[in-house]
Image (cartoon, rainbow, N blue to C red):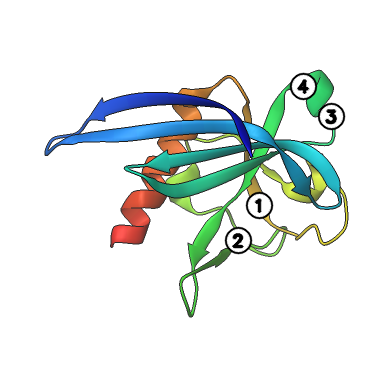
Amino acid sequence: MSLINIDYVARSCSRDHRFRVAIGWRDVYGENRARVVVFVDGHAEVEFFGADDFAISGEVLAEIKVPGDVGERICRYPEEAVPERYVMFNTVGLPVRASGKWLRGAWGVVVNIADHRTMIALAALRKRERER
């Protein structure tokens, strides 16, 4: 359930895009954590969840996704390299910043919950990848 919705409009070469940053709380990996979902033109493109130290750092994490056999899959940490297209983001192995039941060994993007610009940039990247 989202508690706060913040809407943005961004202009690309061809048209305007609507972004919504929805902030709330939900159970993730066995704990009630901060949750941020970024929607692009009404479609959820990326979900972030609070790091173990969220109360102190304010940081949230999103799994890095790569093409898989069917749709997308996580980019495995530490076995795989972070894809080059993620070079502009602060990346970390999720197990370094989060723990809990069913936590996957994946690379992730880490961002402060107030850094909507970076969250939107990641959502736009995911949208472009999905449309390819």
Secondary structure of the residue carrying numbered label 2 = loop
Q: In whole angstroms, how far apart are the C-alphas of marks 1 and 4? A: 19 Å
Mark closer to the chain start, 3 or 1: 3
- Residue 15 position in % (x across, y down): 14, 36
Q: Can you identify the residue that label 2 sits on? A: 75
Sequence order check, earlier mark of 2 and 1: 2
Of marks 4 and 2, which one's residue comes earlier in the chain?
A: 4
Q: Which residue is mark 3?
A: 53
Which x, y percent locates residue 84? 46, 50
Residue at 46% in and 48% down: 44
In which quadrant will I find the C terminus?
A: bottom left
Quick check: 18 above or below 96?
above
User: Which residue occupies 77% across, 21% down?
Assistant: 57
Marks 2/1 in contact by CB < 8 Å: the verdict is yes
Give the class, few, some or many, for how many residues have Cα within 10 Å of label 4's Cα (few <14, many ≥20): few
Look at label 1 and name its amino acid. Answer: Trp
CA separation in Å, label 4 and label 2? 24 Å
Please say if the residues under marks 3 and 4 sit with CB atoms less than 8 Å apart. Answer: yes
Q: Disc 3 to disc 1, how far (Cα)?
A: 18 Å
Residue in the foreground of this view, choosing between 126 and 16: 16
